[in-house]
Amino acid sequence: NRQFTLASRPVGAPTAENFNLINTEIPTPSQGEVLLRTVYLSLDPYMRGRMSDAKSYAEPVAIDEVMVGGAVCRVEKSLNDNFQVGDLVVAYTGWQDYALSNGDDLLKLPKALTTPSYALGVLGMPGLTAYMGLLDIGQPKAGETVVVAAASGAVGSLVGQIAKLQGCRVIGIAGSEEKCNYVTNTLGFDACLNHKDENLAKLLAEQCPAGIDVYFENVGGSVFDAVMPLLNSSARVPVCGLISQYNATELPSGPDRMSQLMGLILVKRIKMQGFIVFDDYGHRYNEFSQAMGQWLAEGKIQYREDKVIGLEQAASAFIGLLKGENFGKRVIEVGPI
Ligand code: NDP
């Protein structure tokens, strides 16, 4: 049983030395338990937070503990009447080949789901994040302008497409020309800008002649700096993630602009609201999965996976995810279905 454990806590960007790849015995289920084998492991930016012991909404991974993560697993042995060998489930078993479960925390996947890895992306946690963050907090209306960064990624790609389905003008921001071409040509956004372009603020202003009504915040940093002056009165800002800051070891340099931001929020009556997807919206999963399932079936939503083969690649693939090396939702293919 291969397991990636947390060897040490990163200072700045994580490195290979922060992880250990070890081999342990495959565990044996007791009465009421199932033995799960990982088929797909999801890699997600929140895992950077779990490597740190700074206070957060969830407990950190302990040193020498298996890294956390959602996975699609196959039931290999079952001593639990609710599960049969061969069932596929979503489970938070982490970065390892095998794990035990008493069944309480498992979501059984319907046999009709032809691409089980979608349960980690468009039909799973990132999908729910995009859907609820945009529709419930962002409240987009037809004709409004919506901006989202990390626009080719798991969450951002869906935010923009859902906003298009609501009749909005949608501007994406992504980290390369190739990603921007995909965002406009395949996902159908109205435009996409590269955040590495030093003229981002000017280019964004040109693309948003009527200002910004909804900014779906995925990254923070210089992208937010470009967005801030363009926010309209009564703009909504769902604060989903701040990936540009996850490896930061100190506050950004330069003048403190907190009072400027607070002043803007005040005079423009801007609503900024953070959310933690399962805590705030877990109870609305069925509503989301019905809507998203239908959009997918009708071909109204495009979805791209960035599959990396082999559990042993998990650490380097995760380090790359934080640098924008992924193109689409990053999952590790750990073993056969
Ligand atoms: P992605 O699939 O979008 O991958 C991360 C992407 O972030 C990279 O590909 C890169 O894209 C972009 N990125 C990295 N560094 C920077 C930077 N300095 N400036 C701008 N962009 C950067 O990840 P997800 O869709 O899974 O997650 C997107 C965001 O949503 C994250 O902030 C994550 O933490 C958050 N999230 C929050 C949840 C919640 O409950 N609040 C739940 C799920 C996700 P590029 O090359 O385009 O720059």
Image (cartoon, rainbow, N blue to C red):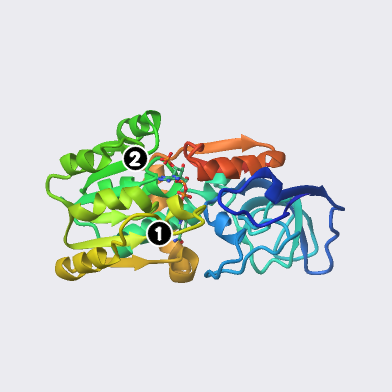
Q: Residue 240: which disc?
A: 1
Q: Secondary structure at mark 1?
A: loop
| Whether residue 115 can be seen here | no
* Residue 206: x %, y % from top left: 16, 39
Residue at coordinates 55% horizontally, 70% vertically from top-left?
55
What is the quadrant of residue 214 in the picture? Answer: bottom left
Residue at coordinates 58% horizontally, 55% vertically from top-left?
47
Amino acid type at circle 1 is Cys
Report the side of 142 relative to 293 (left or right): left
Residue assigned mark 2: 195
Q: Residues within 10 Å of mark 2 (few under 14, many from 20)?
A: many
Asked if the residue at label 2 sits under 8 Å from ligand 1, the reply is yes
Vertical placement of residue 114 versus 213, above or below: above
Residue at coordinates 42% horizontally, 50% vertically from top-left?
155
Could you say which is closer to the camera, residue 42 or residue 84? 42
Residue lying furthest left: 210
Report the side of 228 relative to 311 (left or right): left
